[in-house]
């Protein structure tokens, strides 16, 4: 349902007519401070993507961002996720379209389908799919261009609710730090995080804005709604201004978390390499620092923090299992594995057979998500004198033999990969590059000795980039 006025009434108060209210000035200052939006002749202005639900918070932010464009250089578009969970879902999508049409903002509506009984629960599953849609959004499908920043309308009340929810779940400092106003790693902005919902509603009513109300927001069977409608009012009745106090506490915890991350970065400088972790070095740390480093590593891979029992079990298996033990620990959509005193975070996937041809392109994307980069160089790589205009790239079949070193005999590729200490699950992803029927290049092993460019010869250097890990959206 819509609040304040029916959706069509929004035409009476376009964002261009909004007065420079204190709220508008706060948002403008936030954008100017965090984005450094002053454009230069050599660079295009950043593109912001707003997560638009049609509710009060995101509707107010839509109008504030449109007004901010009058004085700050940035591009703006919006995305509405159509969950289909409510009978009013189509009306909400239509409302968002009307608002964006009136304000001349490009909008994409993305339908998603939730499982009937998702293991994560409806709230978490919907949130995960919503963020996946936002982070997979493309401004230009042809060039795979994505927004520079995703903007959400989380506010001070949301921050207080999140802190209480994390506290009830027994979260540590990282979880209790709740949401950040700017998340550099995921390019996520929350300009309203220091503003109360009451202030947003007062602004919307003053400007005669319309918005939609999700009837599920009153259902206290959902944890967040229970905190919002039952717990926080009770606390506020006894401790006036508790929401701002809780939000301030979250800010203090965020500072403490930054210090812990700085410590983990120091510990990880020598222990983390190519998204793998040295177990011997981890064992040399105190237990608290070892756990802190693991949390830091998981966060860098966009993984939700394991609870205390899970983290203790992970530490136990990594540090105390037999050297030849086959360890594989599920971490949401990824797996934690151990191989020869290193731990790896890895995305399980089926081995995909492929057979491709390189015809001089700068890059080839493989079916498994990895890519091969080709560079013309001098003194290394495949010697161009052999006519390296066409190469065949294929997956492993087994039984291949290879000789990268003129001083050593030809050996099986399996033996060479074992000798190079390449983890078994990584070997399955490696592409093999052939010149005619000769195995010419194997990532991590080298180039066939007869095809290597001499010191003064032009060559083609091939660089293998492993498939990127799947990155879900934020958990908050």
Image: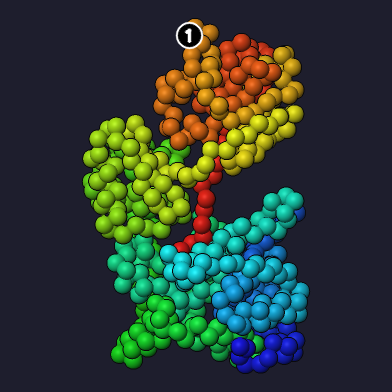
Q: Quadrant of residue 344?
A: top left
Asked whether residue 71 is in view, the answer is no
Please name the residue shown 44% across and 19% down the image: 415
Counting labels gives 1
Examine the rendered structure and indicate whether residue 19 appears above or below residue 421: below
149 vs 462: above or below: below
**Left/right of residue 140 with respect to residue 442 in the rendered view:** right
* Circle 1: element type: loop
Q: Position of residue 336 (x, y in %)?
A: 38, 45
Q: Position of residue 112 (x, y in %)?
A: 60, 67
Q: Which residue is mark 1?
A: 408
Between 365 and 465, the one lying in front of the other is 365
- 102 relative to 466 in the view: left or right: right
Q: Residues within 10 Å of mark 1 (few under 14, many from 20)?
A: few
Residue at the image point whose x is 48% and y is 45% from the top: 347
Rendered image quadrant of residue 383 = top right
Specify whether 62 is left or right of 183: right
The quarter of the rendered structure image containing the N terminus is bottom right
Percent coordinates x, y for residue 18 in the rendering: 68, 84
Q: Is residue 184 above or below residue 376?
A: below
Residue 20, quarter of the rendered image: bottom right
- Foreground: 265 or 7? 7
Q: Is residue 396 left or right of residue 243?
A: right
What x and y, as percent, mark residue 39? 70, 59
Q: Is residue 32 above or below residue 88?
A: above
Residue 48 in sight: yes
Q: Residue at x 65, y 87 (%)?
A: 209
Q: In the orientation shown, which residue stands out farthest toward the front?
A: 116
Give the residue at x 60% y 63%. Answer: 134
């Amino acid at each position: 349902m819509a609040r304040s006025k029916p959706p069509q009434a929004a035409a009476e108060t376009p964002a261009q007519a909004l007065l420079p209210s204190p709220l508008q000035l706060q948002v403008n200052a936030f954008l100017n401070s965090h984005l450094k939006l002053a454009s230069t002749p050599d660079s295009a202005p950043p593109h912001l993507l707003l997560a638009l639900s049609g509710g009060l918070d995101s509707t107010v932010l839509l109008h504030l961002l449109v007004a901010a464009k009058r004085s700050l250089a940035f591009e703006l578009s919006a995305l509405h996720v159509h969950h289909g969970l409510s009978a009013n879902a189509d009306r909400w999508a239509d409302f968002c379209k009307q608002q964006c049409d009136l304000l001349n903002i490009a909008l994409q509506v993305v339908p998603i389908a939730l499982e009937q009984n998702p293991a994560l629960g409806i709230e978490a599953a919907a949130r995960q799919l919503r963020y996946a849609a936002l982070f997979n959004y493309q401004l230009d499908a042809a060039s795979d261009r994505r927004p520079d920043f995703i903007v959400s309308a989380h506010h001070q009340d949301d921050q207080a609710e999140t802190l209480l929810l994390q506290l009830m779940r027994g979260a540590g400092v990282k979880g209790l730090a709740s949401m950040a106003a700017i998340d550099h790693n995921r390019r996520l902005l929350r300009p309203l995080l220091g503003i109360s919902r009451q202030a947003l509603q007062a602004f919307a009513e003053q400007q005669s804005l319309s918005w939609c109300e999700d009837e599920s927001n009153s259902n206290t069977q959902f944890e967040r709604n229970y905190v919002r409608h039952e717990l926080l009012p009770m606390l506020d009745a006894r401790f006036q201004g508790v929401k701002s106090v809780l939000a301030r506490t979250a800010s203090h915890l965020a500072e403490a978390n930054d210090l812990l991350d700085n410590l983990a970065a120091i510990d990880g400088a020598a222990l983390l390499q190519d998204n793998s972790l040295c177990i011997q070095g981890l064992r040399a740390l105190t237990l608290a620092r070892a756990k802190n480093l693991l949390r830091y590593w998981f966060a860098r891979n966009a993984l939700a923090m394991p609870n205390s029992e899970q983290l203790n079990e992970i530490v136990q298996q990594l540090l105390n299992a037999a050297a030849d033990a086959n360890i594989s620990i599920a971490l949401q959509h990824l797996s934690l594995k151990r191989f020869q005193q290193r731990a790896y975070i890895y995305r399980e996937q089926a081995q995909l057979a492929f057979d491709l041809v390189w015809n001089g392109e700068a890059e080839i994307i493989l079916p498994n998500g990895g890519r091969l980069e080709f560079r013309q160089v001098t003194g290394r790589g495949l010697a161009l004198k052999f006519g390296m205009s066409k190469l065949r790239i294929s997956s492993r079949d087994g039984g291949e033999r290879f000789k990268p070193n003129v001083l050593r005999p030809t050996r099986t590729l399996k033996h060479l990969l074992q000798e190079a200490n390449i983890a078994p699950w990584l070997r399955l992803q490696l592409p093999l590059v052939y010149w005619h029927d000769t195995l010419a290049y194997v990532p991590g092993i080298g180039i066939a000795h007869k095809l290597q460019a001499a010191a003064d010869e032009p060559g083609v250097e091939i660089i293998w980039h492993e498939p990127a890990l799947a990155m879900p959206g934020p958990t908050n």
